[in-house]
Amino acid sequence: MNAIQKLRQLHTEIAESGDGLKIVDAWATVARLLPRATTDAAEAQRVLSEKDAEGLGRMIDAIENPAPKASTSQAEATHEEKKAALRAFHKRLKLARLNDESKLGGRLMTGGKKSEIDAVEAPREFPPRVWKALVADGTLRDTGGGFYADASDRPRIG
């Protein structure tokens, strides 16, 4: 049983039970679980302090069925944003490779070997939606952990 199911069960106990001791125990358990399960800490505190069973039910419903967020950050990335982000990405990748190739240690001579860096962290000047759009376009590959690789790059051999 997960925390949401347990909260639902406790809400049912609180709403239907006439036993005061059972309700006190249920509210104590709700006080431990609810702050971890919701992002609205102020409303959770209010529900707990007032022992508001109806408010608890509404919070559980909101946790189980979150309302979709309608914001501008979900909007599609524009062509100009993608172009600027891709330019910044390639510049960061180029600088990372040059930095790796110019190191004195680890090679027999200074330079001569190509860098094996194929992915870099996405520049933070651009929101994640831009990077996701570039991945969806097939321009970049998401390698995980916030790192992206150029989709046109071939695997580097020796």
Image: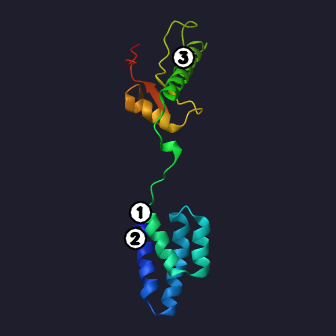
Q: Which residue is mark 1?
A: 65
Which quadrant holds the C terminus? top left
Q: CA distance from mark 3 to mark 1?
A: 45 Å
Residues marked 3 and 1 touching at CB (< 8 Å): no
Residue at 56% from the left image edge and 6% from the top image edge: 109
Local crowd size for mark 1, using a 10 Å CA cut-off: few (<14), some (14–19), many (≥20): few
Foreground tag (1 vs 2): 1
78 and 153: which one is in front? 78
Is 27 positioned to the left or the right of 2 in the image?
right
Is 1 positioned to the left or the right of 119 in the image?
left
- What kind of residue is marked 1? Asn
- What kind of residue is marked 2? Gln
Q: Position of residue 80 (x, y in %)?
A: 51, 26
- What kind of residue is marked 3? Lys
Choose top left, top right, bottom left or bottom right for residue 98: top right
| Label located before the other in sequence (3 or 2) | 2
Residues marked 1 and 2 touching at CB (< 8 Å): no
Q: Which residue is mark 2?
A: 5
Q: Position of residue 69 (x, y in %)?
A: 48, 53
Question: Image height check: is 1 above or below 153?
Answer: below
Residue at 46% from the left image edge and 93% from the top image edge: 18
Residue at 52% from the left image edge and 76% from the top image edge: 55
Q: Position of residue 148 (x, y in %)?
A: 46, 29
Choose top left, top right, bottom left or bottom right for residue 108: top right
Q: Secondary structure at mark 2?
A: helix
| Label located before the other in sequence (1 or 2) | 2
Local crowd size for mark 2, using a 10 Å CA cut-off: few (<14), some (14–19), many (≥20): few
Q: Which residue is mark 3?
A: 94
Is 2 positioned to the left or the right of 48 in the image?
left
